[in-house]
Amino acid sequence: MSHPATDLPHPDRCVIMGVINVTPDSFSDGGRYADSATAIQRGFELAKGGADIVDIGGESSRPGADRIDPAEEIGRVLPVVRELAAAGVYVSIDTMRAEVAAAALDAGARMVNDVSGGLADPGMIPLLAGSGVPYVIMHWRGHSATMQDKATYQDVVAEVCDELRQRYETAAEGGIAPESIILDPGLGFAKLPAHNWTLLANLDRILSLGRPVLIGASRKRFLGEITGSTDGGPRPAQEREDATVAVSAIAALGGAWGVRVHEVAGSLDAVKVAAAVRAADPARAAAAVRAAAAVRAAAAVRAAAAVRAAAGG
Ligand code: PMM
């Protein structure tokens, strides 16, 4: 099967995906962008600040959250997707529902970020099959209400890699072009803090699955726990920005394709610093040149095959 070329941002540094939760109850920006006008304004701010992608979600995925109606999810995200996409912002839709993804793609979204990696809705993979739309497959073990009961692992890195590989193969067998797929270990989703740290420490093993890797650590509780507050409890979500920037630097230095963050400025500086360090490493620079040449060669082969197929040969 031939696929349209994948429309994936590839700046010469780690990609910044800026987050907007158009929800009243997300842990990270709890209700700040619940109405469309404020969310749209925030989207422009993120893009102007340097976000390569703006990720828009209408359903909270915080631990313990209940699900909402698909119609309500669509009503929350659609005006925001439409307005930002029309203005040329690269929009990703954060949803595990095919119905919501379809509406958002119609309204101009260019990427689907599915925290369930295709597990929550059997319609998602058929929707995207053959489309060339970039698809983020996150590691997931169940809905928010119960996910923390599933945070049990013998070897978290091996199990997350294995489960991601299975999701990736299912998506590819379902007709999604492998080059459209981005993998994400799903920090905080069915993970205890130690699991998140172990996954970050073993980014190279996730990268060895052979696809771009997205890391979403921004403002998550494990960052609040490691930094702590003066009263001895975890630091509140709004005060986890410095720790988030530190993870962005570490992820980018380790070769992550992208980081998903609520604030752009600090993480953008962090990934630029990481890119400079990576570029100054001659072995890594040579590997990057080889990888870029391989990508160009693969694209040329695919283009030639598409021309042959169109010519009926
Ligand atoms: N985390 C959240 C929501 N969507 N998507 C991806 N790909 N990776 C993540 O880690 C991720 C996500 C939860 O955080 P939020 O409530 O701040 O958006």
Image: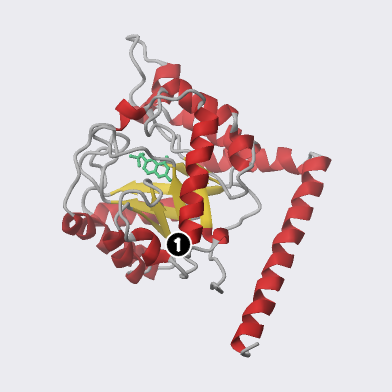
Identify which residue, 43 or 198, lies in the foreground: 198
Where residue 82 appears, as percent x and y from the top left, is: 31, 67
State which quarter of the image contains the C terminus. Answer: bottom right
Picture quarter with ligand 1? top left
* Some atom of ligand 1 lies within 8 Å of the CB belonging to the residue at label 1: no
Q: Secondary structure at mark 1?
A: loop
Q: Is residue 190 above or below residue 38?
A: above
User: Badge 1: how crowded within 10 Å, few (<14), some, or many (20+)?
Assistant: some
Question: What amino acid is labelled 1 in the image?
Answer: Gly
Q: Quadrant of residue 157?
A: top right
Where residue 228 appears, as percent x and y from the top left, is: 40, 15
Q: Quadrant of residue 241?
A: top left
Where residue 45 appears, as percent x and y from the top left, is: 40, 52
Q: What colouring method underlies this structural image?
A: secondary structure
State which quarter of the image contains the N terminus. Answer: bottom right
- From this viewpoint, is residue 80 visible? no
Identify which residue, 72 or 11, lies in the foreground: 72
Q: Residue at x 62, y 55 (%)?
A: 11
Residue at label 1?
Answer: 174
